Every structure is written in structure tokens, then in C-alpha cells.
Image (tube, rainbow, N blue to C red):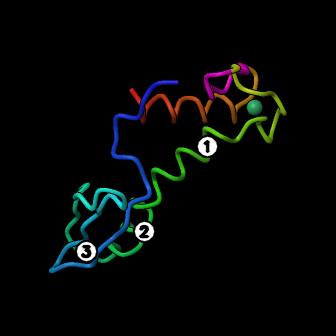
Amino acid sequence: MSAAKHTPGPWHVHDGDNRFLFVDSQTKGSVCKIAVNGHSEANARLIAAAPEMLELLKAMTPCPECKMRGIPGTQKFHWPNCENCIRAQALIDRIEK
Ligand SMILES: [Zn+2]
């Protein structure tokens, strides 16, 4: 398993002046900010949940579709005939490249 290159979660969202600020809950440092638009509040909640969703996805073995476990010690999905495994691993690889 590779070390995360992103700021570890959980992240908290602060509603600021025409923007949402994402803060690392441990260091209180700024992670990022987005400008306000029509969907900003929903987008902010989704973005703030991203680190936890990634960790949950990596922990979801055995795969609920094919019941295969990932590669031991790697948290990688590993079943080339299962669309869920392929999509899950592609998503993790895209995030952690
Ligand atoms: Zn699977």
C-alpha cells in the first residue's frame, strides 16, 4: 500500500465569505477552497467526504459483487472478470497515482 499523497481526512467544511474552505481536522490547516455557486453546499459535502470514501472503498473487500478478496497486504482489488473490482481499482489508481 502506498502512502497517501493527499491530506488525510477527515476534512471539515467552513462556510466562508462567498467560498467554502476545507480544513484538515487534525492540523486545522487549509486543504482547499471552492467558490460559491448554485450547488456549492452539496459539492462541499461531497468533497469533504472524499478521504473517508477512499478509505472505505479500499477497505471493502471481499468485493460485494464477486466475493473475491483483494491482493493480501495491498488493499488492491484483484479480479479481472468483475466489473466492480475493475472500476474500484481504476478509481483508486486514478486518485493515488
Ligand atoms: Zn469483484
In the picture of the structure, the residue carrying the numbered disc 2 is: 45
Tell me the CA gap for discs 1 and 2. 18 Å
Q: Residue at x 38, y 60 (%)?
A: 11
Query: Taken as a whole, is the magenta stretch helix, strand or loop?
Result: loop
Q: Position of residue 65 (x, y in %)?
A: 81, 38
Q: Is residue 46 left or right of residue 24?
A: right
- Judged from this view, the residue extending furthest toward the left is 17
- Judged from this view, the residue extending furthest toward the front is 27
Amino acid identity at mark 2 = Arg
Q: Position of residue 30 (x, y in %)?
A: 22, 58
Amino acid identity at mark 1 = Leu
Secondary structure at badge 3 equals: loop
In the picture of the structure, the residue carrying the numbered disc 1 is: 57
Q: Is residue 96 left or right of residue 58?
A: left
Q: Position of residue 50 (x, y in %)?
A: 45, 53
Q: Position of residue 15 (x, y in %)?
A: 27, 78
The earlier-in-sequence mark between 3 and 2 is: 3
- 81 or 30, which is in the foreground? 30
Mark 1 or mark 3, whichever is nearer to me: 1
Q: Is residue 6 left or right of residue 10?
A: left
* Mark 3: few/some/many CA within 10 Å (<14, 14-19, 20+): few
Q: Residue at x 61, y 23 (%)?
A: 74
In the picture of the structure, the residue carrying the numbered disc 3 is: 37
Whether the magenta-drawn stretch holds residue 74 is answered as yes
Q: Which residues are magenta?
A: 73-80
